Amino acid sequence: MYNNASISQNLTFYENFKKVQQTKLNRIKTLKIYDNYDSKRQLRSFAEYDQNGNETYNVTYNNDSSISSEEKWYYDAQFRAVKSETKDYYNNYITSITFEYHGNDVLPYKQTELRDANLKETYFYFNNALMTKYVTGNLEYIFEYDEIGRIKTRHFFAGYKASYYYDKNRLVIENNMPKAKWRTSEHIYNESGLLVEHRQFDNDKRLISYSFYTYDNNGNLIYSDHGINENSTSRTEYVYEFYEVQNNVSEITQTYDYAQKAFNDGDYAQAVDLLKDFPETSSLYDDAVALMLKALEKLKANKDLNFVSVYGQIGNLGNINVSGFVIFEDLLTGSQVGKCRISKNGYYYIILPSGKKYSYYIDVPGFYPLSRIADFTTPAQGLVLNDNITLISLDEMTEQQLYIRINNIFFDYNESTLKPESFLELDRLYNVLNSNPGIKVEISGHTDNVGSDEYNNILSQSRSESVKDYLVKKGINAGRIISKGYGKSNPVATNDTEEGRQLNRRVEFKILKK
């Protein structure tokens, strides 16, 4: 059920908690679970929500109407979860989790579990959203991460450890504990980052357990199969019934009126705070977006905000009304951090935690997913970014033979090896090619004027080939891609300034055939 999951983000309890919070926006009213191996486990789950859409209570019943489990959530004034309580009557245990916040991170949090009268407490410690230590009972686990924030090593005790290896949509964990039940654990993820297979193997590489998962188009788990060795022990079907929380019209109107008053009084930050979660289903949504944009414009010079924002207007060469989203990702971890709907007038905005570097792209059917970077780690960026974007359709690109810059592509200095931060962007290009099998493209590399012609021609050719190689390895036929290096022959800006030279160092593509 974890929507927006990503193999590139940290597979930690903290990230799982954030993903669970995101899925609560699905507003599940009834969840029915059918276990093929245990007739008592034909479960029905009902959820209750507060006026802000946060789940406050969830109860699950057995098919004989007895309660199987109960879960309660508590929130602070900023709608953040501060505590959860779970009672599992079927397995006879109680779990309580408390959350303490520091800035935008939750650190640490404590889980207290009472199972069969045995009390166990577990502590999770975080630094900048990365788990550094996990303590349960007398055991302590220490985590190390790679350069893009994925778990690299989990240290146990007495020198034992588990090592994490990533390969596209595959994660393999190996531990060196001689008496461990498993030696290797393999996880396979689909293109949306959802776990679809999990297998564990012993020291002799024999399968000791497996799990398979199937999801619907919205990323909700609908079927799972678990087994020991090669024998299935549990098959579960999940059936959902959804409903949308009905907005209280008077409250929504009142919120808009308060925001308008705050704006008129010059309290622009308060107006933003009131409007940042304004419901898209409201008839006042577009008015709220317009007011939000005016407030953000007033805040552009403010250096004391506790949030950052990106906003603007989406247009296109054909002046066609577009419908879609602007999707934001953490450039370090690759995880999706939010998305905003483009209003009917083409406007968009989002409020995000400060101090991070984000990439964002436009998701509109029929148009290329143009991307940008917003670096809020440096004072030069400011805290509010106005970015108006012109979309280009695939048809326009073909008819006009337009070159499109592939943003968010990163190489080391004077090198042609792609850095991992480039993969999100290239995956979007792969999706365009994969969804349009008739497209044939040219990938072109360009440099500034520093260095000899021969050197720049070789470097630009190598970089274009690196992009092509990545797409081919993902499954695109090599015959559909031509790679060319133009060196410094086609500048788009002056080479007399560093800013101009940076614009000239680029990778582009154009559609040759559609």
Image (cartoon, helix red, strand yellow):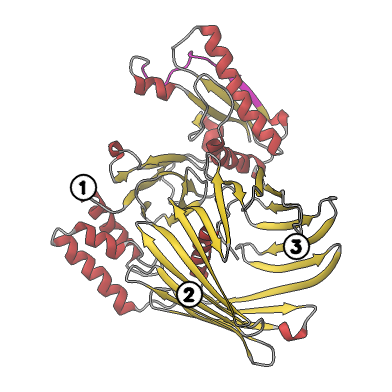
* Count of marks placed on residues: 3
Mark 2, residue position:
84
Taking depth in this image into account, of 15 and 431 the one nearest to the observer is 15
Q: Which residues make up the magenta segment?
A: 482-494
Front disc: 1 or 2: 2
Callout 3 environment at 10 Å: few (<14), some (14 to 19), or many (20+)? some
The C terminus is located in which quarter?
Answer: top right
Query: Could one spot residue 92 in this view of the protein?
Result: yes
Percent position of residue 14, x then y: 51, 59
Q: Residue at x 32, y 50 (%)?
A: 308
What residue sits right under mark 3 in the picture? 211
Q: Is residue 102 magenta?
A: no
- Give yes or no for contact between labels 3 and 1 (Cβ–Cβ under 8 Å): no
Q: Mark 1 points at which residue?
A: 302
| Amino acid of disc 2 | Ser
What x and y, as percent, mark residue 200?
A: 77, 56
**10 Å neighbourhood of mark 2: few (<14), some, or many (≥20)?**
some
- Identify which residue, 330 or 397, lies in the foreground: 330
Q: Main secondary structure of the magenta part?
A: loop
Q: Position of residue 93 (x, y in %)?
A: 60, 80
Q: What residue type is labelled 3?
A: Ser
* Residue type of the residue flagged with mark 1: Asn
Q: Is residue 349 visible?
A: no
Position of 442 with respect to 237 (left or right) is left
Marked residue nearer the N-terminal end (1 or 2)? 2
